[in-house]
Image (cartoon, helix red, strand yellow):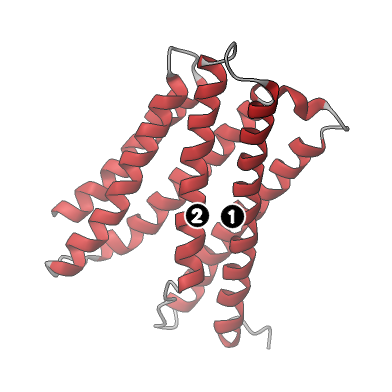
């Protein structure tokens, strides 16, 4: 197994460690979760770069690399959603509107990942590779930045409850929602573009 594939496999192995750090309440666990996510994200950048530079692209890497990315991001979003109600107390105000917002945004992001995966399967059977365009790259980068910010903010809320004023807490929380909202918008744009570009391969005729 070459180095890029080992890095991709490491990203998959890191996912359960991330989930434990995100969900189990030991000291600075959100910070540890954010750190693990950053390390996993760095391997995502490195494996592709090393594979292309040294001509180490393999079928195993083509299969596992996008799968590893999706597993990592979906794990982070699901864990965030699970912790959000207890992490953001004011979410209960207004009939859990913010909780609903997070749920819808996460469903949009995860649905797009399944849609693109299915599209890749269909086009691969016809010998066509679905390229990652600028919108897909923006979506991925923005979502990863959003996830890191959210987990660091959650750690701040846990560690600095006494010094974090209500206004600062609200500002930080609304930034979380804004980042997730923008990620969801970029997700929709990139998903629609994928469908439009590959529409002839998924014709119902």
Q: Is residue 75 visible?
A: no
**Residue 55 shows in this picture:** yes
Q: Position of residue 106 (x, y in %)?
A: 64, 47
Near-viewer residue (74 or 139) = 139
Label 1 with label 2: CB-CB less than 8 Å: yes
Q: Label 2 crowding class (10 Å Cα cut-off): few <14, some 14-19, many 20+?
A: some
* Residue position for label 2: 142
Residue 65 position within the rendered picture, expressed as x and y whole percent measured from the top left: 34, 56
Residue 183: numbered disc: 1
In the image: residue 150, left or right of residue 81? left
Q: Please, what secondary structure does the residue beneath circle 2 have?
A: helix
Out of 39 and 173, give the one closest to the viewer.
Answer: 173
Cα distance between the residues tagged 1 and 2: 6 Å
The structure residue drawn at horizontal position 52% and vertical position 60%, both measured from the top left corner, is 139
Quarter assignment of residue 49 = bottom left
Element type where label 1 sits in the image: helix
């Amino acid at each position: 197994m070459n180095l890029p594939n080992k890095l991709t496999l490491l990203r998959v192995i890191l996912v359960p460690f991330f989930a434990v750090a995100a969900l189990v309440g030991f000291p600075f666990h959100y910070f540890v979760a954010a750190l693990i996510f950053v390390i996993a994200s760095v391997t995502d950048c490195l494996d592709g770069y090393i594979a292309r530079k040294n001509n180490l692209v393999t079928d195993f890497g083509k299969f596992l690399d996008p799968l590893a990315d999706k597993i990592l991001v979906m794990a982070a979003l699901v864990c965030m959603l699970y912790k959000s109600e207890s992490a953001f107390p004011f979410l209960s105000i207004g009939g859990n509107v913010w909780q609903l917002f997070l749920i819808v945004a996460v469903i949009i992001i995860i649905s797009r990942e399944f849609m693109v995966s299915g599209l890749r399967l269909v086009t691969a059977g016809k010998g066509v590779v679905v390229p990652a365009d600028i919108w897909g790259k923006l979506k991925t980068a923005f979502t990863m930045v959003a996830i890191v910010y959210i987990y660091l903010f959650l750690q701040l809320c846990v560690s600095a409850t006494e010094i974090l004023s209500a206004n600062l807490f609200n500002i930080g929380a609304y930034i979380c929602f804004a980042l997730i909202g923008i990620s969801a918008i970029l997700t929709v744009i990139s998903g629609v573009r994928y469908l439009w570009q590959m529409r002839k391969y998924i014709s119902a005729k």
